[in-house]
Amino acid sequence: MKKVIIKTDGGALKNPGRAVSAFVIECNDELVCIHSEYIGETTNNVAEYKAVIMSLKYVKERYKNAKFVLQSDSQLVVRQLSGDYKVKAKNLFPLWQEAKDLVEKLKVEVRWVPREENKVADFLVGIIRRGKSGQDL
């Protein structure tokens, strides 16, 4: 059985602000996908959830009969998806529901990781959020 590791991150400049969602996919310890996407003006939490949703849709289409592990440095997202925290923000509820449905359908193990263990996804968020010169957009 294939083991698919999904690393996600999202962030907004100034929160809310210019936001990016990103994910990295590894299959059997090989890097297979790096994706980042500007998602418009929104909050960090929305960007985090959109990263989770985009990544799970990506693996759902490409991997059958795999063991999925989602890693995120967002304690809020991980704890909400695990049921430890309730979703109080009305704007996050539909995103949580979509992410939760995908997690359950794919039987994804959701883990919190420190930011240091999520460097590539974090880097991808930073690259698009900032201009080519490194200045804030």
Image (cartoon, grey):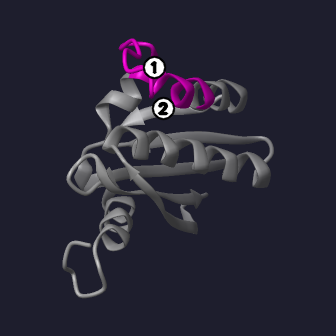
**Neighbour class for label 2 at 10 Å: few (<14), some, many (≥20)?**
some
Q: Residue at left 32%, top 59%?
A: 122
What is the span of residues highlighted in magenta in the rendered image? 80-98
Q: Residue at left 50%, top 64%?
A: 37
Helix, strand or loop at label 1? It is helix
As drawn, 17 above or below 125: above
- On screen, residue 4 versus residue 117, left or right, reads right
Q: Residue at left 37%, top 13%?
A: 84
As drawn, 127 above or below 99: below
Work out how far the residue at label 1 is from the one at label 2, CA to CA, in angstroms: 7 Å
Look at mark 1 in the image and give the residue it sits on: 82
Helix, strand or loop at label 2? It is strand
The reply to whether the magenta stretch includes residue 35 is no
Q: Nearer the viewer, residue 19 or 73?
A: 19
Q: Residue at left 62%, top 48%?
A: 3
Look at mark 2 in the image and give the residue it sits on: 110
- Residue 87 position, x and y percent, is 41, 16
